[in-house]
Image: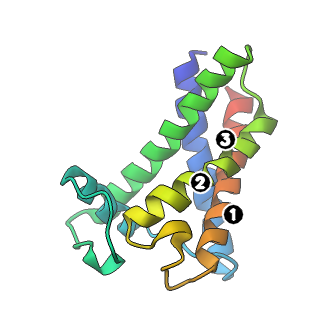
Amino acid sequence: MNLVVAGVVAGVLGTLGMDFGNLFFARVGVISRIDVKGIGRMAVGWTRGRFRYGHPTEMEEVANERLYGFVTHYAIGVALAVPYVLGWDLLVGGPASPVWAVAYGVATTVASWFFVYPSMGLGALGLRSPDGLKAPLSSLVNHLFYGLGLAVGIAVT
């Protein structure tokens, strides 16, 4: 299978893994729910040249923000998976490792902590979130689920 296609499949399955894991664990209160509308507002802000907010209330509501949020969420998942699959083939050779995919998924938490949270006005690690310390833990757990889904995607491609 084409490596880019394998990366796209793995990225979609990784993001689905994140969403389903988040759905369950957020419902029981262990972690915070993914704010898809906030992701949509953030993404629309990017298209307008705004890459960081001082506070989440600065993000204006936009039409179709949930749709924009899901598209952005899955695009990020794919954009993180494709370089993993291509990079593994280039640097190590052969098919990407599902075991290392889990570790890579966890490592992508850094993007959430230091780019996405600040971009949404929640500060580094999301510590300005109303959820406090639960925010960085939630991101870590969500990215573990992303890594598990990524591993499944790599195993089936």
Determine the image quadrant of residue 58. Answer: bottom left
Q: Where 31 falls versus 152 (above or below)?
A: below
Amino acid type, callout 2: Val
Q: Secondary structure at mark 1?
A: helix
Q: Earlier in the sequence, mark 3 or mark 2?
A: 2
Q: Secondary structure at mark 3?
A: helix
Amino acid type, callout 3: Leu
Front residue of 83 and 78: 83
Closer mark to the observer between disc 3 and disc 2: 2
Q: Residue beneath label 2, please?
A: 110
Quadrant location of the C terminus? top right
Q: Residue beneath label 1, please?
A: 141
Q: Position of residue 9 (x, y in %)?
A: 57, 33
Q: Residue beneath label 3, please?
A: 150
Amino acid type, callout 1: Val
Front residue of 150 and 103: 103
